[in-house]
Image (tube, rainbow, N blue to C red):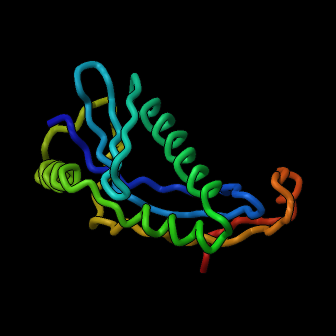
Amino acid sequence: MNQYPMVFRYKNWIQGTGFAAGIELEGRVLLSKEDDEWWISGVTPGGMSEAGADPKDAYTKFRTFFTGILTDLAHQAGNFGDFEAQLRKFMAQTNVVDAKRWDDARAYVKAGGEVDPLLGGFIKLTDPVPPRLIQCVQLLQKTVEIIEPEDLANYVFAQAA
């Protein structure tokens, strides 16, 4: 089997029009090798995939694409509250086909199935983590169109207790 269940963790700040939000979330992705490419496909949230020459390259491209989606959501939102609502809606979307593939891949790996040597100790099984928005906090509200990086210099984005 060339499919591996993964948990995608994301922590970043996203700029909208007049606000900046700190985001931390976890979702499920499926890592698969098809022909000579590695793919990462979103399970929950679903509907996005990126390919790369190796797992790290695929992850980097997926993360960049994911950041673009969140940035688009932030720019389409009228304010922070709208953005948070759209983010929660986005996080609730599941690709049912990939969810089944994720469950099958997890069962395969858990049963001792062979893991591609390129992944080494990358695949670690724990109990399935439900996709979740850990935190989405408004870091800054500003009435100008652009929030500059120095505007956030005094903010520390730390994990909620």
Q: Is residue 147 left or right of residue 135?
A: right
Instruction: Please tell me which residue is depicted at 73% across the width and 58% down the height of the picture.
Output: 17
Q: Is residue 12 visible?
A: no
Instruction: Please tell me which residue is depicted at 34% across the width and 61% down the height of the picture.
Output: 93
Which image quarter is the N terminus in?
top left
Q: Position of residue 94 (x, y in %)?
A: 29, 59
Which one is nearer the viewer's eye here, 124 or 14? 14
Q: Is residue 37 visible?
A: yes
Furthest-top residue in this view:
36
Q: Is residue 91 left or right of residue 75?
A: left
Q: Is residue 33 left or right of residue 51?
A: left
Q: Quadrant of residue 78?
A: bottom right
Which one is nearer the viewer's eye here, 158 or 140? 140
**Is 142 situated above or below 5?**
below
Number of numbered discs overlaid on the protein picture: 0
Q: Position of residue 144 (x, y in %)?
A: 86, 59
Q: Position of residue 127 (x, y in %)?
A: 27, 67
Which one is nearer the viewer's eye here, 50 or 37? 50
**Is 107 situated above or below 84?**
above
Furthest-bottom residue in this view:
161
Q: Is residue 156 left or right of residue 98?
A: right
**Is 124 situated above or below 115?**
below
Instruction: Please tell me which residue is depicted at 38% across the width and 30% down the height of the picture.
Output: 51
Instruction: Please tell me which residue is depicted at 23% across the width and 27% down the height of the picture.
Output: 34
